[in-house]
Image (spheres, rainbow, N blue to C red):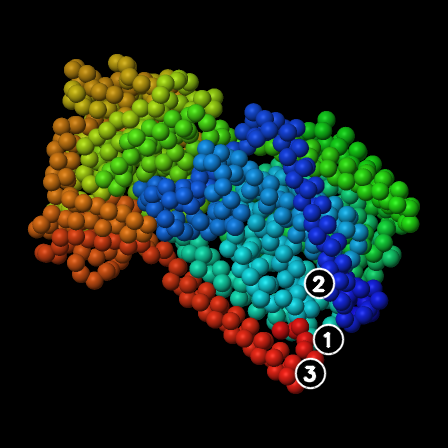
């Protein structure tokens, strides 16, 4: 095919007659099919998505919760905090989240979790319907992705609008969307971004809409830079293929590449204030798990092309049998030009291979091995399969030879996939759905081929294809929902328990006079953002390294390999961090593995120092000064010796060593001798099971695992009786370890009260906190070091009467050396990377304005001289 026919016909930029100019009415008529296709794709996607949840009896259409894994632990709480922020009810602002991690940088979390324009919709929902808000946003994002793909298909080449809508829905309901992104809603912005970025590439090819293209790139990278990076790579591959197929002269091809590069560069530049902040946040985050890529077998790979298969660790490539058959038919479709057939087929195969090779997999993931699924880029291959299917249909129906070849390849795919365990998990679902969907797809395509000029047959074909697509997509989504619920942790949506927690926190809250901890018996890992208060609990991909290491040194527990910190129920750390009120909740009844017990949420109060205290010496140390004992580490921060660490004895045979700890493989007893009236604490981070004083007291649960993804927090067990004898009964639920030395600590509460009194007498007389600023008034004559009970994360700068400087550190907390005349201090937070990002964004904005001005001047000059204008700028 010659160049003019390919570029013009495929882009749909001109009518078939090749007229150079179109009337306004013709352009509107041309745009109508895209709007109709987009609407159809959105409706099909929405109805199928919701129907699947009805079938799975999943929230909001049934009793099964949707909040599995990070959806309940991270994303819903971050949307709840965004709701509070938008309604002026949050502690903090865009710069600092004062509710989590005793004060965490919030802007990187915004860019990672809630920077999508769709996230703002939470504001229109009631606070106690936050789960419904997130579900609605998820559905809207998925539907928008289908609409965007439908528009792209009709831009690449004109065809039946309803077929474009059907394939748009196939893309929106692809396996990646249903299996992964439906509970990682920020990834759905990448699903939307890919077809939009491909449209930007089309505009670069024709020299149209440069400003809109830059804004789309910027919006995509702001909404979710992680999947936007993958979508940008995918769109670049599509554009390069389009250039190859267009056979443009090399100078014009280079000009297109240059326009596209400038568009992408300016768009990313506009997003830089957020993107660079997020990037900088990852540099200061606690390191997660090092992922090691291992490609899946061919049987598992091909199984994921079929409906109702599910796996967390293999690429979810399902796009519907209709789209798959058309994509398989493309190489054999003789009505399609050979270069087009070969180009799209080769691109699909190359991207499929790139998913299976470690170096290219790393490149797809921005050269950082993902902590979780290794196939987060699979949505790009799903898009290419759908685009290939569209080319097979838009050039005219495949003939019987092409459909026969596609059917044969589909049988081969099913035969290889039948060896996979993924098709055996739900064989009673998979094979009937595959057979019905294949029959509907092949039957519908056959009717479509026979129905040329026969509206009745075309209508029947459309109904058959839509019905098959709807049924298999709904079944696939329902299976994925049930499989996730069976394989992952899950959490209840907002209900009576969360409302009781929130009410208890609200009644006790007096921030910033003191902190209110929402409680160790948490509902989700980000309880402070969900129910309020100012706790140590914090779960994010950007949990600061200094926070995680400091809290671990103090005896805190965590999950997700250190990125999900828990509440540490300890009066010493409560004094250090100014926790004046602590909520105590009954065990979450939704977690059936927990010991069940009812009762209301209660609050205990303590007399604690203010957020800012003054230590008598100017010397301050680094976290390296922490030792192996969390009890002694707590005393370093408190500034007083309050614990006795008795010798302990473990009944039974001693197995293990001094470094890794003693093995506990059955019920055993830890014995020690402490002062009567002291409080007993047990620190056993590698122990999993329950512990209880033999003399009575509450049975405490310790949670850890053998893989090192979670460790147990230090816990109080009760008070030492008059005999001074301490016997702790251990009942492990797996082979565990307890420290050979220093597991038991006995707290002298009188000494603690004295230490608190000293800190209060020298502490700040008043503390005020805004978004990124903390100000404290100090007693006259304060000397030494002011210690702020806030983790010294990167970005804090402080002044105590002199010039502002980077904050010092006191065992992981903010420290400010005081001069002889200091009466106040002010600390301000500057997110790392914000200054550089703002500079890059400003330069990009000025460049965009300059280019737009030059283009406008050229058009005006050309109009005055009577020269024809172009749209190449």
Element class at badge 1 = loop
User: In the image, 258: left or right of 602?
Assistant: right
Mark earlier in primary sequence (2, 3): 2
Q: Classify residue 52 by image quadrant.
A: top right
At x 76% / y 68%, what residue is drawn?
A: 22
Mark earlier in primary sequence (1, 3): 1
At x 55% / y 37%, what residue is drawn?
A: 135
At label 2, counting other C-alpha atoms closer than 10 Å, the crowd grade (few under 14, some 14-19, many 20 or more) is some
- Asked if residue 735 can be seen in this view, the reply is no
Closer to viewer: mark 1 or mark 3: 3
At x 71% / y 63%, what residue is drawn?
A: 241
- In the rendered image, residue 26, in percent from the top left (x then y), is placed at 77, 63
- In the rendered image, residue 790, in percent from the top left (x then y), is placed at 27, 45
User: In the image, 284: left or right of 681?
Assistant: right
Mark 1 sits on what residue? 249
Task: Measure the alpha-carbon separation of dots 2 and 3.
Answer: 33 Å
Q: Quadrant of the C terminus?
A: bottom right
User: In the image, 382: left or right of 703?
Assistant: right
At x 29% / y 26%, what residue is drawn?
A: 603
Q: Are marks 1 and 3 in contact (CB under 8 Å)?
A: no
Q: Classify residue 695 by image quadrant.
A: top left
């Amino acid at each position: 095919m010659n160049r003019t026919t390919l570029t013009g016909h495929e882009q749909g930029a001109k009518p078939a007659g090749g007229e150079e100019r179109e009337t306004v009415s013709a352009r509107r008529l041309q745009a109508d099919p895209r709007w109709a296709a987009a609407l159809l794709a959105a409706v099909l996607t929405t109805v199928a998505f919701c129907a699947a949840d009805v079938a799975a009896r999943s929230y909001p259409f049934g009793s099964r919760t949707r909040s599995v894994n990070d959806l309940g632990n991270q994303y819903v709480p971050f949307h709840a905090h965004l709701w509070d922020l938008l309604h002026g009810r949050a502690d903090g602002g865009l710069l600092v989240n004062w509710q989590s991690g005793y004060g965490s940088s919030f802007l990187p979390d915004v860019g990672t979790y809630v920077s999508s324009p769709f996230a703002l919709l939470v504001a229109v929902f009631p606070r106690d319907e936050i789960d419904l808000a997130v579900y609605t946003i998820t559905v809207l994002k998925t539907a928008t992705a289908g609409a965007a793909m439908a528009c792209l298909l009709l831009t690449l080449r004109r065809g039946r609008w309803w077929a474009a809508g059907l394939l748009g829905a196939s893309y929106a309901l692809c396996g990646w969307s249903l299996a992964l992104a439906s509970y990682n809603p920020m990834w759905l912005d990448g699903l939307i971004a890919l077809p939009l970025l491909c449209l930007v590439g089309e505009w670069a090819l024709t020299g149209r809409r440069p400003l809109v293209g830059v804004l789309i790139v910027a919006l995509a990278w702001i909404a979710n830079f992680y999947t936007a990076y993958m979508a940008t790579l995918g769109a670049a591959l599509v554009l390069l293929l389009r250039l190859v197929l267009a056979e443009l002269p090399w100078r014009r091809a280079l000009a297109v590449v240059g326009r596209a590069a400038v568009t992408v560069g300016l768009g990313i530049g506009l997003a830089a204030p957020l993107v660079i902040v997020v990037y900088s946040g990852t540099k200061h985050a606690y390191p997660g798990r090092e992922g090691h890529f291992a490609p899946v077998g061919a049987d598992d790979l091909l199984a994921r092309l079929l409906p109702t298969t599910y796996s967390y660790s293999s690429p979810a490539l399902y796009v519907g049998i209709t789209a798959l058959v058309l994509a398989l038919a493309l190489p054999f479709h003789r009505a399609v030009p050979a270069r087009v057939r070969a180009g799209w087929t080769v691109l699909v195969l190359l991207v499929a291979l790139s998913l299976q090779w470690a170096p290219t997999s790393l490149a797809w993931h921005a050269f950082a091995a993902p902590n979780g699924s290794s196939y987060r880029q699979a949505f790009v291959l799903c898009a290419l399969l759908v685009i290939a299917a569209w080319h097979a249909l838009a050039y005219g129906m495949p003939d019987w030879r092409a459909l026969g070849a596609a059917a044969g390849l589909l049988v081969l795919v099913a035969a290889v996939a039948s060896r996979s365990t993924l098709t055996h998990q739900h064989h009673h679902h998979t094979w009937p759905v595959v057979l019905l969907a294949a029959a509907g797809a092949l039957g519908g395509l056959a009717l479509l081929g026979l129905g040329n000029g026969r509206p009745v047959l075309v209508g029947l074909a459309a109904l058959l294809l839509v019905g098959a697509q709807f049924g298999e997509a709904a079944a696939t989504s329902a299976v994925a929902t049930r499989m996730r619920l069976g394989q992952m942790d899950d959490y209840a949506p907002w209900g009576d328990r969360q409302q009781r927690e929130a009410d208890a926190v609200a009644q006790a809250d007096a921030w910033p006079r003191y902190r209110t901890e929402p409680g160790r018996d948490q509902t989700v890992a980000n309880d402070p953002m969900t129910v309020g208060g100012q706790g140590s609990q914090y779960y994010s991909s950007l949990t600061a390294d200094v926070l995680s290491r400091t809290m671990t040194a103090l005896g805190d527990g965590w999950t997700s390999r250190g990125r999900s910190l828990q509440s540490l129920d300890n009066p010493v750390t409560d004094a250090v961090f100014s926790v004046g009120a602590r909520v105590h909740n009954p065990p979450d009844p939704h977690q059936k593995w927990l010991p069940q017990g009812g009762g209301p949420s209660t609050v205990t109060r303590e007399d604690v120092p203010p957020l800012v205290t003054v230590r008598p010496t100017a010397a301050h140390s680094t976290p390296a000064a922490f030792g192996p004992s969390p009890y002694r580490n707590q005393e370093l921060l408190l500034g007083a010796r309050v614990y006795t660490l008795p010798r302990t004895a473990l009944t039974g045979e001693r197995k293990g060593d001094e470094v890794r700890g003693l093995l506990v493989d059955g019920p055993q007893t830890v014995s020690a001798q402490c002062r009567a009236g002291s409080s007993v604490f047990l620190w056993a981070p590698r122990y999993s099971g329950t512990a209880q004083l033999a003399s009575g007291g509450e049975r405490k649960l310790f949670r850890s695992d053998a893989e090192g993804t979670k460790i147990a927090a230090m816990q109080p067990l009760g008070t030492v009786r008059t005999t001074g004898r301490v016997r702790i009964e251990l009942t492990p639920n797996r082979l565990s370890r307890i420290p050979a030395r220093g597991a038991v600590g006995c707290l002298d509460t009188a000494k603690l009260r004295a230490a608190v009194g000293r800190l209060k007498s020298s502490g700040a007389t008043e503390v005020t906190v805004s978004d990124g600023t903390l100000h404290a008034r100090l007693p006259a004559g304060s000397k030494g070091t002011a210690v702020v009970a806030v983790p010294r994360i990167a970005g804090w700068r402080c002044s105590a009467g002199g010039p502002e400087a980077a904050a010092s550190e006191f065992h992981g907390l903010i420290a400010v050396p005081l001069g002889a005349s200091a009466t106040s201090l002010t600390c301000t937070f500057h997110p790392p990377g914000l200054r550089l990002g703002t500079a890059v964004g400003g330069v990009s904005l000025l460049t965009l304005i300059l280019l737009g001005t030059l283009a406008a001047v050229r058009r005006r000059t050309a109009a005055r001289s009577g020269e024809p204008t172009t749209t190449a700028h």
